[in-house]
Image (cartoon, grey):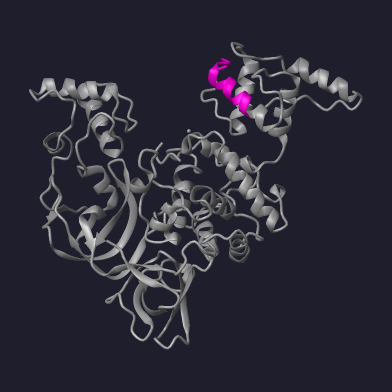
Amino acid sequence: MKNSRRIVGMTLPALSFLTAPCIAYAQTVAHPVLSYGSTGSAVVLLQQDLNKLGYSVGSVDGDFGPRTEAEVKAFQSAHHLQVDGIVGPATWNALDAAVKAPSFTNVDLRFSAPSNINAQSINSFLTKNNSPMAGLGQSFIDAQNTYGVDANYLVSHAILESYWGRSQIALAKNNLFGYGAYDANPGDDAGMFPSDDYAIRFQAWEVRNNYLTPGGSEYVSPTLNGMNVNYATDPQWASSIASLMNELASYVGSSVNAYQQYPSTQAVPQPQSTAEPVFYLNGATGQTKSNTYYKGVPYFPSMSDGIDDMYFGPIQYGSYGQSVVEIQKYLNKKMGAGLTVDGQFGPSTEAAVKKFEAAHGLKQDGVWSFSMWTTYIDTTAPPTLPAGQAVEIDEIEQGMAGGYVVPWYHIANVGWVDSQYVKFTNVYRLTVPNPTSTQTSIPVYSSSDATHQIATLHSGDFVVAQSASPSNGMYQILFCAQTADSGATPGTPITGYVSAKNATLTAQP
């Protein structure tokens, strides 16, 4: 996937007196044969149809070039046509039929899934497919209800990105959607999430605000086809998720016809919240680690302030992320560099940095150093905590550090810090005996006698414990209510007990 980051057809009126061969002939006349090198309005129509179906040709420019030819061949292959890149009658007819047919790639994802997609049916479907995500059905429904994102889509996307929850990134980092799993080093670069439930809520928030809402940073249309443009480099990404959505719909005896197609004449439901989800901790402690540049741990009033203002390392050719955005904006403002503000430190940005360095008598190496950052970008030094200080962490939010996906911790009564500079001292992950099985839900009891269940947690969830050893076969854990759907105010501290037969505690660094 891309973490930062990739549409109308003309049809003929129905003429009842024409025979089938005549209809085909009429369509051939309306749609001329096209091939590499063709130009004009018919190519525009072709490109629009391909984009709508998830075959990304890029800009609709009316020029049948290599990218359009490649996507035509991909469409022909998927529809069992002759794969020659030539758009003749058979390919036009298949395109027309595909564009007109209801499709999961064109479902308006801002509408809730039909009522037969519920916590019970999701868990049943995941269990049937031997997925360790079994038990997370309510999390998908809660995310749908809070952020207004189709729960079938959320389930299907998680299945695709995490191999049904069995990928190493999902198991080791509660990362169900592949955030930060860049191709060069996916295992190390992938972001850590404090629970699968939080990962699901975060995905719903991210998608609704940035991909499905007009004006969002990645918005094209509120569909899988629209998301495919900026979310994934794979042109078949939308089709792959659509296939899984169809599988889940079929499992509950439904079909795409029960889902709202885009555009819709119905009013779009508004989400209950547009605020980024928070993971609450109960009694978590840690110790600060020194930051090379700041000689301590810088803290900020909000995570977004930290992402914008903190210096994360040498910013140079190949760097990407918000730090590069800030430099590009600065160079455009101060020296009219004319850079595209895309967060990508490429040749143009490097040349502009060298020009800036030359104008200010600095070493012309094209690297935006820490001293340049504090002199020209973030001129007000943030306050810092000394290394080795004991702190209390009460909240986690998922964020960025330069180009990398990392959680940020809220230090109680202080502010937000990059989690890379805090080591937990009493936080553990609940680990079930077989994390790849469907037995991944963990009952939590009100007392050590295991008679009254008060909650259900999931394998991988962060909890707090004063001891990593059980007492009389039970672990005492501290955690918080995370959503209003749990029946308590989010952030409400809870003390509970987990049987050592159901799970063990694994230290979270």
Dominant secondary structure of the magenta stretch? helix
* Residue at position x 13%, y 24% in the image: 357
* Quadrant of the image occupied by residue 385: bottom left
The correct choice, above or below, for 356 with respect to 417 in the image is above
220 to the left or right of 364: right
The correct choice, above or below, for 450 with respect to 335 in the image is below
303 to the left or right of 16: left
Is residue 274 shown to the viewer in this render? no
* Quadrant of the image occupied by residue 34: top right
Q: Please tell me which residue lies in front, 428 or 495.
A: 428
Q: Please tell me which residue lies in front, 34 or 16.
A: 34
User: Residue 71 in magenta?
Assistant: yes
In the rendered image, the quadrant that contains the N terminus is top left
Q: Return the x and y of residue 156 as percentages of the image width and height.
A: 57, 51
* Residue at position x 65%, y 60% in the image: 115
Residue lying farthest to the left in this orientation: 361
Q: Return the x and y of residue 377 as percentages of the image width and height.
A: 18, 36
State which region is magenta: 61-74
Residue lying farthest to the front in this orientation: 434
Q: Return the x and y of residue 470 as percentages of the image width and height.
A: 34, 80
User: Residue 391 in magenta?
Assistant: no
In the rendered image, the quadrant that contains the C terminus is bottom left
* Residue at position x 59%, y 25% in the image: 71
* Quadrant of the image occupied by residue 494: bottom left
Q: Return the x and y of residue 202 as percentages of the image width and height.
A: 43, 54
